[in-house]
Amino acid sequence: MQRPIARPAGTPIEALDTPALLVDIARLDAAIGAIGGIEGPARVAVWVHGTPAIARRQTAHPGVSGIAVRSVAEAEVFAAAGFGDIRVLRPLVTERARSRAAALADTARLVFADDLPVWGGDALADAVSISTRVTSVPEPGRAITDCGQKAVGRDFGDPTVAGHPEWRAHAGSAEHGVVLFDPAERALEVGDWLRFVPSDVATVFSLHDQVCAVRDGLLEGVWPVSARGAF
């Protein structure tokens, strides 16, 4: 995944390099605020996004008392970011993993037992998308974009096009995506800007080094996906 050129806060999202991982802050906060089914304290599965900035917003919810990760490496990332109550969902199967966990004892409390319910974070899907641009229109009704499998994934299905549920999209190759549309309704052209909604949030975060936090169509900040690759 190439690293996009840095843009200042206030940049319109259409002006960001594509493809780019976007999270709509208003939608994100609404999804967190609408966490349902929690009776008493719970943890949030921050391994879904690997992003401390998102985890901070999640743990501000009154029903959340800690986070859950899937590896000691992820625990190290979040402990370094200031999170002190971390459940590791997988057992420590190597001596190296156990020694790394022990080294965290001074900075964080690691839990390996099934102590609290874990909220998976699926509702974040409403806030997450990938910006993309049309790079060619080889025939009427078929457009090629710069958002392929490396940017949006396809392990759990193809993405959809935000605002156009009637169109079909798929990550056709590593570098390029395909959008099928009715040319009688709209003729896509080279340079047109679209947003793909991924089929799986965890997969798409694992493909990007950073996420562009946007509000009202403008860039507000760039958040590192710090736990990317922390297997």
Image: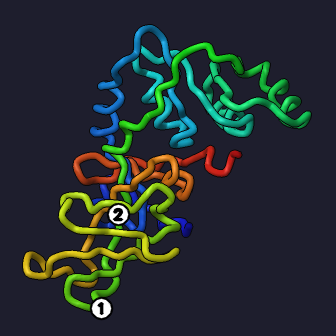
- Residue at 40% in and 20% down: 61
Secondary structure beneath disc 2? Answer: strand
Q: Residue furthest toward the bottom?
A: 138
- Residue type at mark 2? Ser
Q: Earlier in the sequence, mark 1 or mark 2?
A: 2
**Circle 1: residue type:** Pro
**Residue 86 to residue 120: above or below:** above
Front residue of 200/82: it is 200
Q: Residue extending furthest right?
A: 95
Q: Secondary structure at mark 1?
A: strand
Name the image quarter holding residue 57: top left
- Asked if residue 171 lies left or right of residue 216, the reply is right
Q: Which residue is mark 2?
A: 131
Q: Residue 210 at x, y = what percent?
A: 51, 53
Q: Position of residue 44 (x, y in %)?
A: 50, 27
* Image marks 1 and 2: residues in contact by CB distance under 8 Å: no
* Residue 107: image location, x then y, percent: 73, 22
- Please name the residue that numbered disc 1 is placed on: 138
Q: Crowding at label 2, few (<14), some or many (≥20) Cα neighbours within 10 Å?
A: many
Nearest the eye: 168 or 210: 168
Left or right of residue 44: residue 217: left
Residue under the point 91% across and 34% down: 95
Q: Quadrant of residue 63?
A: top left
* Residue at the extreme top of the image, as rendered: 40
On the rendered image, what quadrant is the N terminus found in? bottom right
